[in-house]
Image: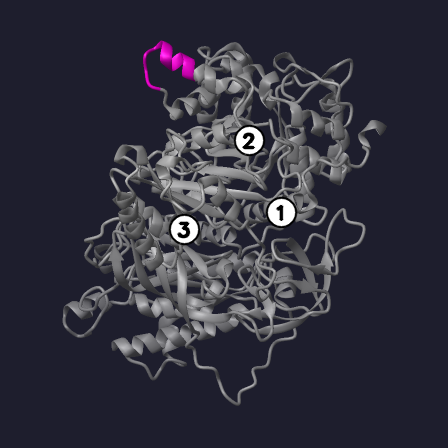
Amino acid sequence: MESLVLDRPAATVPTMRHLDELEAQSIYILREAFARLKKLALLWSLGKDSNVMIWLAQKAFFGHVPFPALHVDTGKKFAEMYAFRDRYAKEWNLDLRIEPCPPIDAVDPTLPPAARSAARKTEGLKLALAKYGFDGLIAGIRRDEEATRAKERVFSPRGVEGGWNVRDQPPEFWDQFNASPPPGAHLRIHPILHWTEADIWAYTQRENIPIIPLYLARDGKRYRSLGDADITHPVASNASNIAEILIELNDSKVPERAGRALDHETEDAFERLRAAGYL
Amino acid sequence: MTVSAQFSTSPLPGSGRPQLRIVIVGHVDHGKSTLVGRLLHETGSLPDGKFDALKAASERRGMPFEWSFLLDALQTERDQGITIDTTQIRFRARSRDIVLIDAPGHTEFLRNMITGAAQADGAVLIIDALEGVRDQTRRHGYLLHLLGVKQVAVVVNKMDKVGFDATRFEAIRDEIATHLTGLGVEPLAVIPISARDGDGVAAFTDRIGWYRGPTVIDAFERFRTARALDDHPLRLPVQAIYKFDDRRIIAGRVEAGHLAVGDDIVIMPAGKKARIKSIEGWSVTSAPEAIGAGQSVGITLDRELFVERGDIIAHGGTAPASVRRLRVRLFWLHENSLAPRASVVVRIGVMQVRAVVESIEKAIDPGDLAATEQQEIERNHVGEIELVLSQPVAADRYVDSPPTGRLVIEVDGRIAGGGLILSAQADERMQPRDIVPVSSSLGADERAERFHHRGAVVWFTGLPGSGKSTLALALEQRLFRGGGSPILLDGDTMRTGLNGDLGFAPEDRSENVRRLAEVASHLAHSGHIAIVAAVSPFLKDRAEARRIAQAHFREVYVATPGDVCESRDPKGHYAKARAGEIRGFTGITGDYQPPDDAELRIDTSSAEVAASAEQIEQMLRHTGILLDLKK
């Protein structure tokens, strides 16, 4: 894990000021969620985005994460991810809740294979929601990741079934958030919705936030985005540290989720998954 | 326009260059998508060969090329090299990075237009030269002003359709400039363009040789980027007070001004004074000594004061007023009109407070030139309203401090409208003279630790015989057995002593309620749960009780049907009233005004006493009165 301590940034990274603004806004959102909802959890996927989110929560609450970190576990993550989870759950003093997913047979058989596999996670999430009765789930999605995520609100209401109605979203402006889910429904809270992939890496570097080594290139390949081991593929890369990742992103025309099979099966697979409650 | 793209051809986002967020608004079909496509092309933001390929494809099919095809193509090809999102496009202008925000032109998506436009530093208002200024043009112009987007460039598009006629352009320019100036928005430029052909977008052409202003790209260079309000008076709204360890940290975001360790501050609306002892941080080697606008911070004070969410920390001399009556210019998005006397929830920053709409003026459709004033504010309309808040809060006029001078109104927990505070009147409550109140030396936290609850006023209202006293007694028992400190204030019982001089005329009833509320409020301040059972038939009296008890107040409406109450008649009063022996008896000869905003509603004709008491406890737990002991 020594390799996780990274060199200081080269010249062309998002500026201090820009990162400070992003950080202040995310902290504001996390504190609003904590003040206005009764039973919160943070969805910890173990990836770079949710690690930044946990870091921001520690800043917002002065070294504490005052809600559970929920890992909805498909059981098919990379070994490095599980090792990371077990180490940092302790180090960050997290109230870690690991929730399993149902078998694949329980999932909509009309979805393409990878989407079906991802939909398992949605089912696992629904079970966890029913078990704990959370009224707010903090999730690390970003607008720049994917077309349907761009339409999201910061506080995004979900139906009783966990569904997302993109056509009937409430207005959200002046940092005023709709925080009153009807009984049985819940809210998704998106504290890093306004960040970009480059912002995440620049901040990870500035703050020295630990990452899973799979993000760094080995033998000409690295993972840009981490999901289940069987439906996530590495991209060609020689970036062996974050500074090099930032330079690579600068030159790349390949989208971040290109290695995520589920995005590419059919045009509407992702939208269908999100409408059903996928992140 | 529903498509946009983030191009990674440019250097890293935010690499030291200023970022400018621009929203494109205007009537549907006035050419927003075409302008976006053209802008991407002119700024070299498109992938190599994309434009030529699409043009060739159009020619093969015998169709004229449309710039909006480009956006469609980008969306469907998002997996082949470009990250697309549907609300924001990033590209580079000469000296800055531009984020274009999509704002739908359809009326039914006005809430989405508002959500998008509120994030913008500036706006481009697009008008079709052939159609001219339309209702949605005016409506969007009006909303930009209400959203605080002051920098607006107007483009008069499709000049090719009017033969690049300068006279036509000038007529539209004058009309829209007059409209915007009337709203206090000075347009930065009014630009004649043909987004389809490129005139006026990035370059001048002979066809608009008569025009002397900037191009669209030039105009982008003239917009000012967002600037934190460092030079304004300090405004630190309190988001929360954290006690995760031995520190008692007041957390919030500095909305304006700056603060430093050692500053003398005042906490509004109460006006308490203290000094900043420290600025707290995590993962920083040394916490900063001073901090400016835009930062989320935590501070500690040099003394223990009762501070709560919604208070505003400021410097003495430049502190916000403590206000109860506000005049607000409002836009309304809810499907039900806003009517006078409506009881609403208002949020000013993080402060949430109940309010009554006292009056409505100038309610109009901002899109309709011939609009006449209405009594109510309809969906997508605007107006000026007078709000009376249930308790004094700290707030500013919008012109003095935008972040603490604007508010939203919630209906059923959903944002239904937003507005700017035009003027605010100070708290009307009489300030006692020559009276020096003595404060207890025990803190609220200390008491809460003993009782496992915070102080509260649980106010039972309902018809005589509805079961108020029964429920009050049951609640008292439960709280007491749980180690709490409940104190019962039964309306009838109090009338035998403290209120013995009062009758049942409306003004006597008001005074009765006021005294009960004052006593209950005092008990709540001392950490007890005062349980009041009183018919308290009038809305305005209960609103006054809520104002007196402020955040301690929890109203329980005992909504047992009148016929059930009468059949019970525990004190024989209904029978006497029917016989004419009691006059002005609520439920028979006197009105009862049921609350529509009580924290809880219980019908004792269908619910058991124990279950109801349990329900009340749950409400008290959910609203932060009963404290969980699990930690």
Query: For mark 3, what is the residue?
Result: B612
- Mark sitting on residue A21: 1
**Disc 3 and disc 1 on one polypeptide chain:** no
- Specify whether residue B403 is painted magenta: no
Above or below: residue B54 compared with residue B137: above
| Pair 2/3: label in front | 2
Position in image of residue B354 (x %, y %): 40, 60
Q: Could you give the CA–CA distance between mark 2 and mark 3, rounded to whole angstroms?
A: 49 Å
- Looking at marks 2 and 1 on the same chain, the residue that comes earlier in the sequence is marked by 1
Report helix, strand or loop for mark 3. Answer: helix
Position in image of residue B432 (x %, y %): 48, 84
Position in image of residue B204 (x %, y %): 43, 37
Crowding at mark 3 (Cα within 10 Å: few <14, some 14-19, many 20+): some
**Amino acid bearing label 1:** Glu
**Disc 2 and disc 3 on one polypeptide chain:** no
| Pair 3/1: label in front | 1
Position of residue A219 in the picture relative to residue B624 (left or right): right
Report helix, strand or loop for mark 1. Answer: helix
Residue at point 24%, 56% (across, down) = B376
The residue nearer to you, when weighing A112 against B254, is B254
Q: What chain does badge 2 belong to?
A: A
Residue B558 visible in the displayed image = yes
Residue B409 visible in the displayed image = no
**Amino acid bearing label 2:** Asp
**Amino acid bearing label 3:** Ser
Position of residue B282 in the picture relative to residue B93 (left or right): right
Q: Could you give the CA–CA distance between mark 3 and mark 1, rounded to whole angstroms?
A: 48 Å
Query: For mark 2, what is the residue?
Result: A144
Location of residue A121 by image quarter: top right
Q: Which residue sits furthest bottom? A: B434
